[in-house]
Image (cartoon, rainbow, N blue to C red):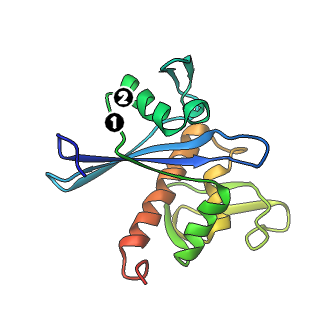
Amino acid sequence: APNASGRVNILILGSDYRAGRGFRTDVIMLLSINTANQSVTLTSFPRDLYVSIPGIGMERINTAQEYGGFALTTATFQQNFGVTPNYYVMTNFDGFKGIIDTLGGIDVEAATTLKDTCSVRSQEDGMGYCTVPAGTYHMDGEMALWYVRSRHSSSDFDRTRRAQEVITAVFKKIVSEDGIN
């Protein structure tokens, strides 16, 4: 349901959850749907962005979920950005791969070429590297996870852009005829 301004805000969280180790949210995006003018915006928040977390103090934004679940994450967004998430979606590595594999893979529009170390057997070049060239590249869940998480040859800003590229590809696939079976 839209809020008073005609917006529906959906918080998209990618968790690094592993049993016995807790978790933090490595991917934090706000998908805002404006029902009045039928537009959509996707805003990424760097995981290491320091914000005021209610009851905790100044801390990285990716710790809010760990400290207090969705209630605290929502309060953090309200306090720091004046935005109230109406809904949320959170997935871990396996869930992320499963979503993409269920869709039959996705076609990612890569802004730049990425070459980095990897262990994706189907894509690895025999020397321990995978490459995604700039342009449209079809990915299964395992490759998409590597693409989003790759960090040795690029910056956190590059990771954020790649995460946006993957989320955009997922939404395009979902709303296409191929995504709705």
Query: For numbered disc 2, what is the local secondary structure?
Result: helix
Crowding at mark 2 (Cα within 10 Å: few <14, some 14-19, many 20+): some
Amino acid carrying mark 2 in the image: Gln
**Cα–Cα span, label 2 and label 1:** 5 Å
- Residue 131: where, in percent of width, then height? 68, 62
Q: Nearer the viewer, residue 61 or 73?
A: 73
Can you say whether 4 is above or below 127 in the image? Answer: above
Residue 138 visible to an observer of this rendering: no
Residue 115 vs residue 64: left or right? right
Instruction: Identify the mark at residue 84; answer none if there is no mark.
Output: 1
Tag 2 near tag 1, CB within 8 Å: yes
Task: Assign the C terminus to one quadrant of the image.
Answer: bottom left
Crowding at mark 1 (Cα within 10 Å: few <14, some 14-19, many 20+): many
Can you say whether 27 is above or below 58 in the image? Answer: below
- Identified at 41% across, 71% down, the residue is 174
- Residue 28: where, in percent of width, then height? 50, 42
- Residue 10: where, in percent of width, then height? 38, 48
- Identified at 56% across, 75% down, the residue is 102
Q: Nearer the viewer, residue 35 or 87?
A: 87
Q: Residue furthest left?
A: 36
- Residue 180: where, in percent of width, then height? 40, 79
Q: Which residue is mark 2?
A: 78
